[in-house]
């Protein structure tokens, strides 16, 4: 039996993490079994344990990867508050709201992460801090620490707004939540 090189194993592991991230956000962590995740990745169930010790281990890796990718997305934005406003306009848009699988891991998974083991909560905590630090750095480039509380408030407001908008069955009400959420976000940017 041929053994795969380290790069192939790393690429396969990353593929599983990315596929699981989409599935978790779409169907929830509890609604996504290992069999469906591996089928999504084009692999057999038996291959799972060559990459992860357990589903909890996978969830921890997915959370870290998803938040890391979200934090990295800031680097493609214009600097300062202009980039932050661009991020918020995209974040609080109907397109983002309606695309769970490719959207924000916080808005899609917070209720489940709260019930996950400590390792997953630690991965989320580390990732959330990086995002809040990025926001603070855009609010006050010369002294990000001075804007940390404001950045945390903006982050929590944006995530909560998106979650609420996703939960409403009335499209007009859901759109109004996003619109008012963006207006509130602009208050943080002043």
Image (cartoon, helix red, strand yellow):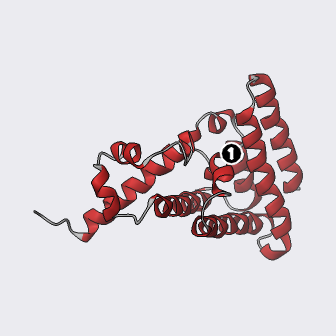
Residue 178 seen from this side: yes
Residue 112 point in image, percent of width and height: 64, 52
161 left or right, relative to 68: right
Residue 142 seen from this side: no
Residue 82 lies, with reference to residue 28, above or below; the image says below
Residue 32 point in image, percent of width and height: 48, 44
186 left or right, relative to 32: right
Q: Pick whichever, 79 or 8, lies toward us.
A: 8
Residue 155 point in image, percent of width and height: 76, 56
Q: Name the residue: 85% across, 49% down.
A: 186
Q: Name the residue: 89% across, 51% down.
A: 187
Q: Pick whichever, 146 or 58, lies toward us.
A: 58
Q: Quadrant of residue 90?
A: top right
Q: Name the residue: 59% across, 57% down.
A: 70
> In the rendered view of the protein, which quadrant contains the N terminus?
bottom left
Instruction: Identify residue for label 1.
Output: 91
């Amino acid at each position: 039996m041929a053994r795969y090189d380290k790069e192939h194993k790393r690429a396969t592991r990353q593929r599983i993490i990315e596929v699981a991230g989409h599935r978790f956000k779409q169907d929830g962590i509890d609604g996504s079994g290992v069999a469906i995740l591996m089928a999504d990745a084009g692999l057999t169930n038996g291959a799972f344990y060559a990459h992860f010790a357990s589903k909890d281990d996978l969830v921890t890796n997915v959370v870290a990867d998803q938040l890391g990718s979200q934090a990295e997305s800031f680097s493609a934005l214009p600097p300062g508050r202009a980039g932050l406003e661009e991020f918020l306009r995209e974040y609080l848009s109907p397109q983002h709201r309606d695309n769970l699988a490719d959207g924000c891991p916080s808005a899609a998974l917070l209720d489940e992460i709260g019930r996950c083991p400590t390792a997953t909560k630690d991965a989320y905590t580390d990732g959330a801090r990086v995002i809040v630090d990025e926001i603070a750095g855009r609010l006050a480039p010369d002294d990000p620490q001075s804007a940390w509380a404001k950045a945390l408030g903006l982050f929590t407001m944006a995530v909560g707004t998106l979650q609420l908008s996703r939960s409403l069955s009335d499209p007009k009400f859901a759109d109004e939540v996003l619109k008012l959420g963006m207006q509130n976000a602009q208050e943080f940017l002043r």
